[in-house]
Image: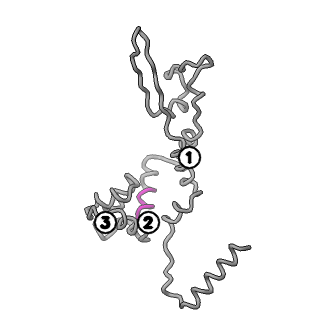
Amino acid sequence: MGKLKNDGHERFCQEYVKSLNITQSYIKAGYEENTARAAGSRLLTNVNIQERVAELQKHIALRNEVQASDIAREFMRLGYSNIQDFIKKDGSLKNIAELPRHIAACIQTVKTKDIGGGKFETEIKLYSKEKSLESLGKHIGWFEEHQKQKQAKEDLTKYTTKELIERVKAQKSLVSK
């Protein structure tokens, strides 16, 4: 496909693959801020935009040697992380430097606080399990809302009213079975 002819659309695609944030991508592409959310979402339903985004994402993955299975594995590690992996049987914190890499990668932040008397309190925060599992679900196509963004809209104007009614009846009968 290559670069889009519309410079604004191309900039939107370039920004979107960096952040996956529709609103910010729309603004950074030079469009008006006050309509960014709705207009950006509309723009992302454009088949040419979808194809260009897919093409750019493929280039990024190839350039960085990223495989879909690598991403899924990381989401799984974060989503299935367990605080017990960081705590000794006596309740104290394990030495983070000695944790296996895949376990340590689940830590988002470490805070150490001097509580006096030569003692320190260490707090660890893991990445959000909910967000990781949601991302994993989207990644493997479990969430219909995420899938709808990927699908082009069907042009219903080519059907007569009678044909549209018949299609709805047919879909209802499939659902009730």
In this rendered view, identify the residue nearer to me: 104 or 177: 177
Q: Where is residue 134 in the image (x, y as percent from the top left)?
A: 54, 50
Q: Position of residue 73 (x, y in %)?
A: 57, 43
* Mark with earlier residue (2, 3): 3
Q: Main secondary structure of the magenta part?
A: helix
In this rendered view, identify the residue nearer to me: 59 or 124: 124
In this rendered view, identify the residue nearer to me: 105 or 35: 35
* Mark with earlier residue (1, 3): 3
**Alpha carbons under labels 2 and 1: distance apart:** 24 Å
**Alpha carbons under labels 2 and 3: distance apart:** 20 Å
What SS does tag 1 mark? helix
What SS does tag 3 mark? helix
What residue sits 41% from the left and 58% below the top? 56
Could you tell me the amino acid type at mark 2? Gln
Q: Which residue does the numbered mark 2 point to in the structure image?
A: 50
**Residue 21 magenta-highlighted:** no
Could you tell me the amino acid type at mark 3? Thr
Q: Where is residue 75 in the image (x, y as percent from the top left)?
A: 54, 44
What residue sits 41% from the left and 15% below the top? 115
Which contiguous range is marked in magenta? 50-58
Q: Is residue 97 above or below residue 151?
A: above
Q: Which residue does the numbered mark 3 point to in the structure image?
A: 35
Q: Position of residue 153 (x, y in %)?
A: 49, 74
Q: Which residue does the numbered mark 1 point to in the structure image?
A: 133
**Alpha carbons under labels 1 and 3: distance apart:** 31 Å
Image depth: mark 2 or mark 3 in front: 3
